[in-house]
Image (cartoon, rainbow, N blue to C red):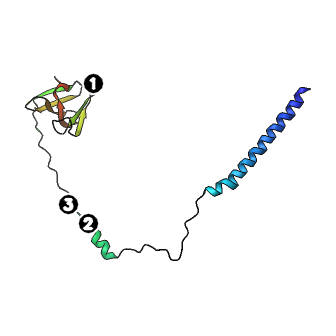
Amino acid sequence: MRFPETAKSGTSLAFSLGLIGAIVATGWYYVILPYQKHPQRPSFTNDLKAAPAPKSLIAEMKAPVMPQPTVKPKPKPTDAKYQGKVNASIGLVFRADPSQSAKNVGGADFNTKVAVIKETPDREWLYVRNENTKEEGWVRVGNIRKD
């Protein structure tokens, strides 16, 4: 006997919650959302309109086309002092100058073959060429092992 009473109260509870949900959704779509939209900007008869620039000004504003300077490639030394491999496990970054603060110009992964072209007088830096990509740059001496 208890089941039909429970079913009645459960059904009435579901109906009541559904009715409340429908009222909230209707209120949201027809009352709240219309006020969240921004109105269009009004236009008035005395508004200043942007006048087009005279054609003579446009011609003066165009800059003449400057020719691009031609970059002469550096002569690449063909003979390397010796061959080596990168022994730094994280690879190497090639630098533009023999300095830690110089900009990066390339790199090589671990165990990549490199050709050592020259070295600084203090023997701290080597100028190397990556044999795979032909990138060149300065690296520290301890990061290359001779083959």
In the picture, the quarter occupied by the C terminus is top left
Number of callouts = 3
Mark 1, secondary structure of its residue: loop
Q: Which residue is mark 2?
A: 63
- Residue 62, compared with residue 32, is above or below; it is below
Q: Which numbered disc, 2 or 1, marks the residue that appears first in the sequence?
A: 2
Tell me if mark 3 has few (under 14), some (14-19) or many (20+) residues whose alpha carbon lies within 10 angstroms of its own: few
Q: Which residue is mark 1?
A: 89
Q: Which residue is mark 3?
A: 67
Residue at left offset 16%, top offset 51% = 71
In the picture, the quarter occupied by the N terminus is top right
Residue depth check, mark 3 versus mark 2: number of the one nearer the observer: 2
Percent across and percent down for residue 18 are 77, 42
Residue at left offset 14%, top offset 31% = 125
Say which amino acid is labelled 3: Pro
Residue depth check, mark 1 versus mark 3: number of the one nearer the observer: 1
Depth order, front residue of 24/78: 24
Image side of residue 1 versus residue 53, left or right? right
> Farthest residue in the right direction?
1
Depth order, front residue of 113/13: 13
Task: Using the rendered view, name the quadrant where residue 21 is placed.
Answer: top right
Image side of residue 30 versus residue 100, left or right? right
Tell me if mark 1 has few (under 14), some (14-19) or many (20+) residues whose alpha carbon lies within 10 angstroms of its own: few
Label 3, label 2: how far apart the Cα atoms are: 12 Å
| Residue 26 visible from this viewpoint | yes
